[in-house]
């Protein structure tokens, strides 16, 4: 996990079941790879269902492009944050690159970490707002 994400510290927000178990799959260069996004998010959101605001998955997308020998990945999460009986729609985006001849997996992991950091910042801002 990147330093910025580790330093951010976990927030008291719960992950709905579909988000805790979220996995993404990617086929690049004939190799199928899976990414356990739910595990990554579980490290930055640590609340208990029923006693904390809850994030629920609306949609996730992973785009991977190869330009020459360089990979670029974009990962998007659209979620709802349920807090005090209201829902707020959030969209987090992460972009990750991989240098020449580095596997596509590296670009994808970088994008997912960037997306998790973007989501953490957005949720932290919402939690700081007065109720």
Image (tube, rainbow, N blue to C red):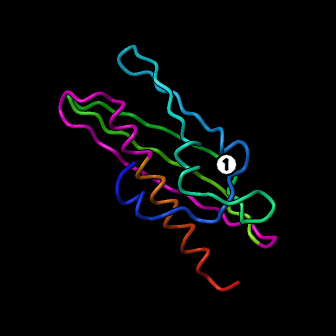
Relative to residue 31, is residue 78 depicted above or below? Answer: below
Where is residue 33 drawn, in percent x and y?
Answer: 46, 23
Q: In this view, does 56 lie to the left or right of 122?
A: right
Q: Which of 72 and 50 is in front in this view?
A: 50
Q: Which of 51 and 23 is in front in this view?
A: 51
The image quadrant that residue 70 belongs to is top left
Relative to residue 6, is residue 126 depicted above or below? Answer: below
Q: Which residue lies furthest to the bottom in this view?
A: 130
* Label 1 crowd (10 A; few <14 / some 14-19 / many >=20): some
Q: In this view, does 85 lie to the left or right of 88?
A: right
The image quadrant that residue 68 belongs to is top left
Q: Name the element at disc 1.
A: strand
Q: On the image, numbered disc 1 is attached to which residue?
A: 57
Q: Quadrant of the C terminus?
A: bottom right
Across the whole image, how many numbered discs are drawn on residues? 1
Where is residue 94 drawn, in percent x and y?
Answer: 42, 51
Residue segment shown in magenta: 84-112
Where is residue 10 drawn, in percent x and y?
Answer: 54, 61
Q: Which residue is drawn at 40% across and 48% down?
A: 1
The image quadrant that residue 85 belongs to is bottom right
Q: Which residue is drawn at 50% across and 33% down?
A: 35
Relative to residue 16, is residue 33 depicted above or below? Answer: above
Q: Nearer the viewer, residue 75 or 128?
A: 128
Q: Is residue 42 left or right of residue 93?
A: right
Residue 96 included in the magenta stretch of the image = yes
Residue 50 included in the magenta stretch of the image = no
Where is residue 102 drawn, in percent x and y?
Answer: 24, 30
């Amino acid at each position: 996990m990147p330093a910025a994400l580790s330093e951010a510290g976990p927030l008291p927000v719960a992950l709905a079941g579909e988000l805790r178990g979220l996995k993404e799959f990617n086929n690049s260069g004939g190799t199928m790879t899976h990414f356990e996004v739910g595990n990554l998010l579980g490290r930055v959101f640590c609340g208990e269902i029923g006693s904390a605001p809850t994030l629920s998955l609306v949609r996730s997308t992973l785009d991977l492009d190869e330009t020459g020998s360089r990979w670029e990945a974009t990962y998007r999460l659209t979620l709802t944050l349920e807090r005090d009986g209201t829902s707020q729609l959030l969209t987090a985006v992460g972009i990750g690159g991989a240098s020449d001849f580095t596997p596509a997996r590296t670009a994808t992991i970088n994008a997912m970490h960037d997306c998790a950091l973007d989501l953490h910042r957005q949720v932290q801002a919402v939690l700081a707002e007065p109720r």
